Image: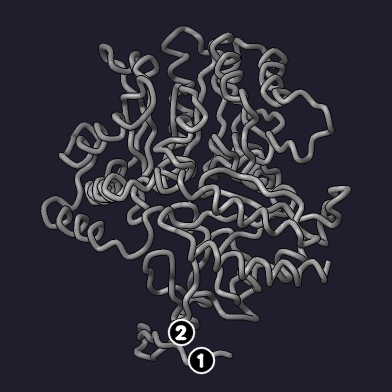
Amino acid sequence: MATTPQYVTQTEDGEESSLQELAKRHLWMHFTRMSAYERCEVPILVRGEGCYVYDENGKRYLDGLSALFCVNAGHGRAEIADAMAEQAKQLAFFTNWSYAHPRAIELAARVAGLAPGDLNRVFFTSGGGEAVESALKLCRTFHKHNGEAGRYKLIAREIAYHGTTMGALSATGIPALRAPFEPLPAGGHHVPNTNSYRWPEGRDPLWAAEAIEAKILFEGPETVSCVILEPVQNAGGCLTPQEGYWQRVREICDKYGVLLISDEVICSWGRLGHPFGAQRYGYEPDIITTAKGLTSAYSPMGAVIVSDRVAEPFMEGANMFVHGFTFGGHPVSAAAAMANLDIFDREDLCRHVRDKEGELRSMLEGLRDIPIVGDVRGAGFFHAIELVKDQDTKESFGDGESETLLRGYLSGALYENGLICRADDRGDPVIQLSPPLISDTEQFAEIEGVLRKVLTEASKRS
């Protein structure tokens, strides 16, 4: 039942308007069908505390998505806000274009100390898409410095999401996101992902890794710049690697002189129980892209973390990486990141994820008695449920059926029942869960209660 909005503001003409009215008239939301709000209210969230957020009417929701895989330390951390305020008083902003400031220096050193191997150089950005864009440009120019200007192609996985800037979009393997903006920059090529739930029985576990070598050979190794992969692929529903996958990919990249980018915009900062997903799966990339959980999203920030070998050509003579962003390494964002990492250290959030991962997974596995639940997969606090018409045959839903199931029922029903998570069909239809890293038994039980109720009803409707 609708209630009177608590939040009212004044427009330029002096009239009072509710946030609902103003949102519908002026706010253009991202990846959103704006026409949907002609018939219903815009979900307006006004406050967060721990694992929960509250809307303008005071209703509480369990944030089972960490907003968008990023509020890792939880909502309402006053010490992060205090660190940001203190930094803003001291030095609110100065650019990293040929200048430095203490917080960026300290944060770069701290990130390098947590990264695997010799990934010691940190190039800051404003977010994840910018980090991926930067990494792709870095790979091309690295090869040019080494006399291999013909290496411009990238290899990514089908259905993978790597960002929406034109360069990053060439790596993104989701046709519906690419089509409106084509032609994209040349060089993006895609190989199968690791969704073994959809593989035929008996397939070689390293088939998806071997497909990368086949693609490099088909395109010509002398033309391939980099391979970009997520430790656990987000789009498609938390697709985990097969045992030995990453080690084989590393071998292939080394064999053909191709750089390996570990896209950890989601998978870093404890999401998989380690500072970086590469550490979970035991491989050392040439480059890591990161964002989101670096500041627990209290302020926008991303980074490209680069090995000494890849950075070396740019540190010599008159060479430079001819690239940058005004707000990369922003002092207030860097202060937020430092305070955020202090929380990680003090509360040992990575260990908490490792300790509680089994409990979260067991809860989700317990939903398999609901006929619509096909597969449960993921790692750390990053899991998905793939939805099917038939558990035995794994028959999926058609496009129209998926539209009705996800947008016609599930998305709204989950939210109405107090759970924020993602109902997505960029591959087969899935429900994704990525709760704050402070989540525990109480929150898992709440998630289970909502999922069981809503998925049981969805199963009856399908």
* 250 versus 106 height, above or below: above
139 lies left or right of 106: right
Which residue bears the numbered disc 2?
57
391 lies left or right of 384: right
Question: Which amino acid does the dot numbered 2 rest on?
Answer: Asn
Image quadrant in which the N terminus is located: bottom right
Q: How is the image coloured?
A: one colour
**Residue occupying the far left of the picture:** 90
Question: Which amino acid does the dot numbered 1 rest on?
Answer: Thr
Q: Residue 435 appears at what percent x and percent y?
A: 49, 57
Image quadrant in which the C terminus is located: bottom right
Nearest the eye: 122 or 453: 453
The residue that appears at 71% across and 38% down in the rendered structure is 195
Which residue bears the numbered disc 1?
3
* 444 versus 119 height, above or below: below
The residue that appears at 65% across and 47% down in the rendered structure is 237
Q: Residue 186 appears at what percent x and percent y?
A: 62, 28
Q: Is residue 129 visible?
A: no
The quadrant holding residue 389 is bottom right
- Mark 1: give few (<14), some (14-19) or many (20+) Cα within 10 Å: few
Q: Is residue 369 visible?
A: yes
* 46 versus 216 height, above or below: below
The quadrant holding residue 455 is bottom right
The quadrant holding residue 161 is top right
Q: Residue 234 appears at what percent x and percent y?
A: 59, 44
